[in-house]
Image (cartoon, helix red, strand yellow):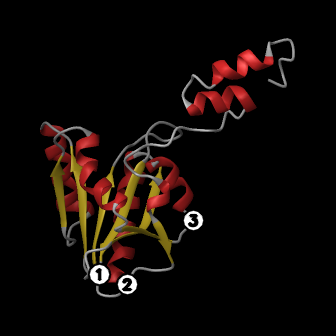
Amino acid sequence: LRDNPHLNQEEYEQNLYKLDPVEAARLLSGDWTIREAGIMFPRDKVGIVSEEPPNCRYARAWDTASTPGGGDWTVGLLMAQAPDKEIYVVDVKRARLSPLGVKRLIASTAVSDAARGHVAILMGQEPGSSGVIVVDDYKRDTLLGHDFQGVKETGSKVDRARPLSALWEAGHVHLVRGAWNAKFLDEYE
């Protein structure tokens, strides 16, 4: 409104409130950084803690991508399940690397994760023979000696996210404080 004083201010403002709240805020105040929050992982339902409790079970899941300089990210999410079944997101690795860089990141992360004790390593297995080949290569080479398995991806990403979303909304998911928290919350929201 301040940028366009020639407009009928009252009428323009009334019309803005007929839009969705995000678009209205963008046009009303010129705040182009505002985003619509998702409904599956509301930011206010997750707590940030200093560390996970003792005696947790650990797993790191990888979603691989090889797009140096742009495109999709390779992401490795380390989660812990406490004896009381609460879930803790302990660490997130994010990188845009070459295929060899991705393999090196996954291998070095497996070694550093092993300091926690047993950490299962999971990787999404894309459909078709290429997914089988990639998982087999990681099993026989990059992650040899680690508890590793490919997980066939079935259903939509939304369907696969529903179980974690339900735990998240019920307040059973916690983040361990880290430099990755803000980007993680932005992406999940």
Q: Which residue is mark 1?
A: 56
Residue 90 place in picture, x, y as percent: 41, 71
Q: Return the residue nearer the eye: 41 or 56.
A: 41
The reply to whether the C-beta atoms of the residues labelled 2 and 1 are less than 8 Å apart is yes
**Left or right, residue 107 beside residue 32:** left
Query: In terms of sequence position, does the residue under pointer 2 or pointer 3 come before the other?
Result: 2
Residue 182 place in picture, x, y as percent: 56, 57
**Left or right, residue 103 beside residue 32:** left
Which of the 4 image quarters holds residue 53?
Answer: bottom left
Dot in front, 2 or 3: 2
Q: What residue appears at the point 64 percent right and 18 percent down from the top-left corner?
A: 15
> Which residue is farthest bottom?
54
Q: Which residue is mark 3?
A: 179
Q: What residue appears at the point 53 percent right and 40 percent down from the top-left corner?
A: 69
Q: Return the residue nearer the eye: 158 or 183.
A: 158
Residue 138 place in picture, x, y as percent: 23, 57
> Which residue is farthest right?
5
**Left or right, residue 87 beside residue 137:** right
Distance, label 2 to label 3, CA atoms, is 20 Å
Bin the neighbour count of mark 3 within 10 Å (Cα to Cα): few under 14, some 14-19, many 20 and up. Answer: few
Distance, label 2 to label 1, CA atoms, is 7 Å
Q: What residue appears at the point 17 percent right and 54 percent down from the top-left corner?
A: 150
Query: In terms of sequence position, does the residue under pointer 3 or pointer 1 come before the other?
Result: 1
Tell me which amino acid carries mark 2. Answer: Pro
The reply to whether the C-beta atoms of the residues labelled 3 and 1 are less than 8 Å apart is no
Residue 31 place in picture, x, y as percent: 71, 35
Distance, label 3 to label 1, CA atoms, is 22 Å
Tell me which amino acid carries mark 1. Answer: Cys
Q: What residue appears at the point 57 percent right and 33 percent down from the top-left corner?
A: 21
Residue 96: in sight, yes or no? Answer: no
